[in-house]
Image (cartoon, rainbow, N blue to C red):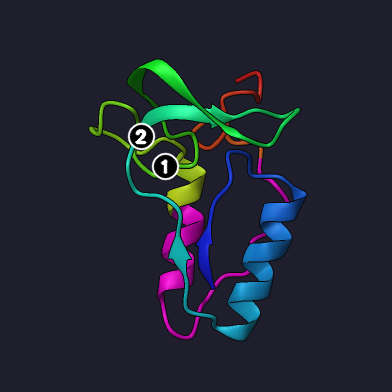
């Protein structure tokens, strides 16, 4: 499975990881980098690419690393991807745990 990524550990992600785990599928996650170079965007009305007057570095929200490259952006992502790296894949993720080290919106 190649080039997939998410920003949220929701139902889609858990089902997808469970699918990969049960079948011991090899994968390539998108992306490692914490930032990306952005030169423009696609105009939603026309579908054409529009260049920015001043291209810049922006956050790669699907990236494993944070914007500063000194930490993991989403600790839960590292936990889930590490579980898939063992062969055969061991854990099948359970429903979303509300543990503060994995989620900042637990109220904890």
Total marks placed: 2
**Image location (x, y in percent) of residue 66:** 35, 32
Q: In percent of the image, x 65 and y 28: which residue is there? A: 43
**Tag 2 residue:** 36
Q: In percent of the image, x 49 and y 34: which residue is there? A: 61
Q: Is residue 70 above or below residue 33?
A: above
**Looking at the image, do the residues carrying marks 1 and 2 touch, with CB atoms under 8 Å apart?**
yes
Instruction: Report helix, strand or loop for mark 1.
Output: loop
Provide the major secondary structure of the magenta segment: loop
**Image location (x, y in percent) of residue 35:** 34, 32
Instruction: Report helix, strand or loop for mark 2.
Output: strand
In reply to whether residue 23 is colored magenta, the answer given is no
Classify 10 Å Cα crowding around label 1: few (below 14), some (14-19), many (20 and above): many
Q: Nearer the viewer, residue 36 or 44?
A: 44
**Image location (x, y in percent) of residue 63:** 42, 42
**Tag 1 residue:** 63
**Image depth: mark 1 or mark 2 in front:** 2
Classify 10 Å Cα crowding around label 2: few (below 14), some (14-19), many (20 and above): some
Residue 80 appears left or right of 45:
left
Q: In percent of the image, x 64 and y 61: which residue is there? A: 93
- Distance from disc 1 to disc 2, alpha carbons, whole Å, reads 9 Å
Tell me where the magenta segment starts and ends, as one range. 79-97
Q: Which mark is residue 33?
A: none
Residue 81 appears left or right of 5:
left
Which image quadrant for residue 36? top left
């Amino acid at each position: 499975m190649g080039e997939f990524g998410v920003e949220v550990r929701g139902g889609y992600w858990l089902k997808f990881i469970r699918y990969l785990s049960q079948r011991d599928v090899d994968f390539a996650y998108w992306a490692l980098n914490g930032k990306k170079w952005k030169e423009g965007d696609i105009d939603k009305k026309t579908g054409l690419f529009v260049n920015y007057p001043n291209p810049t570095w922006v956050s790669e929200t699907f990236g494993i690393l944070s914007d500063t490259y000194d930490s993991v952006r989403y600790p839960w992502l590292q936990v889930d991807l590490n579980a898939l790296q063992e062969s055969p894949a061991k854990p099948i993720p359970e429903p979303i745990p509300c543990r503060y080290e994995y989620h900042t919106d637990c109220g904890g």
